[in-house]
Amino acid sequence: MAPLLEVRDLTVHFPVRRSLLARQRQYVHAVDNASFTLAEGETLGLVGESGCGKTTTGLAVLRLIPFTSGQVIFQGQDLSSLNRAELRHFRREMQIIFQDPYSSLNPRMTVQRIISDPLKIHGQGNYRERAERVAYLLEKVGLTPEQASRYPHEFSGGQRQRIGIARALALSPKLIVSDEPVSALDVSIQAQIINLLIDLQKEFSLSYILISHDLAVVEYICDHVAVMYLGQIVETAPYRDIYTDPRHPYTQALLSAVPTFDISAKYEMSVLAGDVPSPIQPPPGCRFHPRCPIRMDECNRIEPAMKEVTPGHFAACLAL
Amino acid sequence: MSRRKNRFLYDFLRDPAAIAGAVIMLVFTAAAVLAPLLAPQDPYDLEILELGDSLKPPAWEADGDPQFLLGTDDQGRDILSTILYGLRTSLSVGFSVMLLAGSFGVLVGLLAGYYGGVLDAVTMRTADTVFAFSTTLLAILFLGLFKQSGVGIVILAICIADWVRYARTMRASVLEVKEEAYITAAKATGANDVHLLLVHLLPNALPPIFVIMAVDLAAIIMLEATLSFLGVGVPITKPSLGMMIASGKNYIYAGCWWLIVFPGATLVLFVLGLNLFADWLREELNPRIQRSR
Ligand SMILES: Nc1ncnc2c1ncn2[C@@H]1O[C@H](COP(=O)(O)OP(=O)(O)OP(=O)(O)O)[C@@H](O)[C@H]1O
Ligand code: SF4
Ligand SMILES: [Mg+2]
C-alpha cells in the first residue's frame, strides 16, 4: 500500500540578509535532502537539537513555507505542484498543533469561534451544526461544551493545548504535525496530553509527525523515528531499533542524555558539548564531523549517504 | 471577556490621572457638542454683535459686564461662547482627521506589514519622507496650493502628514502579531487573505492604535491651532481656539489678557487631559505588563 505521506529530498533554504557589499547571496540550510515516509495511522518522531530544522520540515510538509526543492507526496498527490486553490482542498486533510499554547489561540476569540473557524473557512455546516461539532470536539479532547463561550486566557496551558487539538481535529484531518506539543507544559500534564494524542489517533486513525527534542516523549508514542542533525536526517528506523540499536554516533550521544534509557550507549552527551556549527555554512563532508567522537580522516571530505543497516533501519555515517 | 473588562475598569478607577484625563476629555467634548445650547451667544451671528461691547474684561473685573462672564473680544463677541464654538471647530477637525488619516494609515500599515515586499518598501519610504518634513510645513504648503480656507481643506492638509503615525504603528504591530502561532494555524486551515487580515490580524494588531488616537487628537488640535494662529487655518468667521489666540495677541499690550489666557488655557487643559488618558492607556495595553499578571 502506498504510504499516506512521502517526502523526497525536501530542501528548504532561507536567504540571509547580508550587507550590501556581500558578493554572494547566502542561505540558511535549514533542511537538506530530507526523505521519509509515513503510513496511515502511524507516528513518525522527528528529533534533534534546537535549530536542526524540525519545525521547518513540519511547516514545509504542510506547505506553510515554500521549499527550495524536493517533493511532498500526500495521498498520491505531489503538493509542490498545486496552486493555492488546489491546496485549499488538501488543507482539510493536514493540520498542525503548536508548542506554545499561549500564542496558538487567537486571544480575541471565544473557544467556540476558535474551533469553528476552520469549519467556517471551508463553509461546513450552519451555525447550529458547527456549535454541535464544537461541543463534540470539546468532549473528545477532555473539555466540556459549556467552556465554548470562554476566552483562551481563562484556561490553563494544558487546557489551551486541548483547545488547539480540538481545532486541529475540526476538519477531520488525516495527518497532524505536532510541533513540540508538550514541551511548554508542566511535566505532570505532559503525559495527559500525550495519552490524549494516542487515544485520538486510535479513534480517528490519524497519522502524526511528532516533533520533539525529548526522546522520552517520542519513545512513548512513535512508530518510527527520524533523527535530524543540522538540516539533515542522519538516522531513521522503527522506534525500537533507535533505542536498542542506535547506529549513528549522534543518535547514540543523544540517547545517552536520556537517563531513563539503559542502553549500550558508547558515547556520552558530553561529546556534544561543542557548539552546533552554523547552518549558513554547514561543515563539508559529514556535517557532524566537528563534534564526532569517532571522526575519521575522510569525514570532512566525503558526505555519507543513507545506508540500510538492518531492514528498515537507515543511517548516514562513513563508519558503518 | 467580562473578566478582562472588569480588570480594565478596576485599573482605571485606581488611577487618578487617568480619571482626570477622561473627565477633561468628556467634559470638553460634551461642551463642544452642546455648544449651541450652552453658549450665551452665537458668536457666528454677526448681526447681534455690538461694537460698544468690544474688549470688555471678565465679569468679576471692575469694568466687567455680568452678561459676558469671560469678557469680550475686539468684535464684541462673548469669549465664553467663542471658546465653546471654537472647541467645536477644533474637535470636529480633530475627529475628522483622526478618522480619515487613521483609517488610511491603519489600512496601509496592515497591508504593508502583512505583504511586505515592494508594497512595504514603497509605503514606508513615503512615510519616512513625509515624516522628515515638519507636519506644520507640509500642511502650510498644501494650504498654499489651494489658496482658500475652509474647514475641509484644513482637515485634508493635516491628513497629509498625519496618516504616517498610524501606518507605522500598525505596521510594527502587524509584524509582531503575524508571527503568532494562531496566524499559522489559520493559514493551515486554508484561510484566505481577507479572512486572515480582517478576522485574525486586524483585531489583534489594533490596540496600539487606540493609544496613538488620544495622543494624535491632541496633536491635531494643536496643529489646527497653529495653522489658524498663522492665519492659514479655518476662516476668520468661524474662530477656532488658535484663531482666538492669534487675534488676541494684538491686544496683549493693551492689557486685554483675557483674549489669550482663556482660549489658551482651554487648549492646554484639553491637550493635557488627552495625554493623561493616553499615558494610562499605553500602560494598560502594554502586552509585557499584561503577561506578567
Ligand atoms: N524564516 C526563517 N528565516 C531564516 N532562517 C530561519 C527561518 N526559520 C528558521 N530558520 C533557521 O533555520 C534553522 C532551522 O530552524 P527550525 O526552527 O526548523 O529548527 P527546530 O529544529 O525547529 O529548532 P527548535 O527546536 O529550536 O524549535 C535554524 O537555524 C533557524 O534559525
Ligand atoms: S561520517 Fe564520520 S564524522 Fe560523520 S558521524 Fe560517521 S564517523 Fe562521525
Ligand atoms: Mg521548532
Image (spheres, helix red, strand yellow):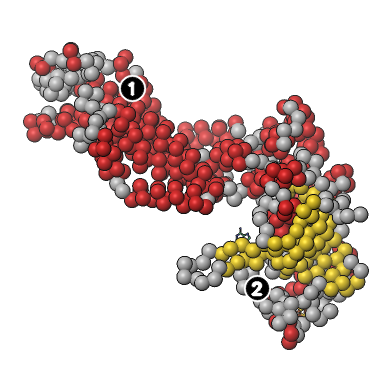
Mark 2 residue's CB less than 8 Å from ligand 1: no
The picture quadrant where one finds residue B50 is top left
Task: Depth check: give the residue in front, B163 or A128.
Answer: B163
Q: Are marks 1 and 2 on the same chain?
A: no
Q: Is residue A264 left or right of residue B198?
A: right
Label drawn at residue B31: 1
Q: Chain of mark 2?
A: A
Instruction: Residue at 77% x, 76% y: name it.
Output: A304
Please indicate, yes or no, whether residue A265 appears anywhere in the rendered image.
yes
Q: CA distance from mark 1 to mark 2?
A: 69 Å
Q: Chain of mark 1?
A: B
Secondary-structure class at tag 1: helix
- Residue A169's place in the image compared with B89, above or below, is below
Task: Depth check: give the residue in front, A119 or B79.
Answer: A119
- Within 10 angstroms of label 2, few (less than 14), some, or many (20 or more) residues? some
The picture quadrant where one finds residue B237 is top left
Q: Which residue is mark 2?
A: A282
Which residue ends up furthest to the bottom in the rendered image? A297
Question: What amino acid is found at the position of numbered circle 2 in the picture?
Answer: Pro
Q: Position of residue B69 (x, y in %)?
A: 20, 19
- Residue A10's place in the image compared with B23, above or below, is below
Label drawn at residue B40: none
Instruction: Residue at 82% x, 39% y: name it.
Output: A140
Instruction: Residue at 35% x, 21% y: name it.
Output: B33
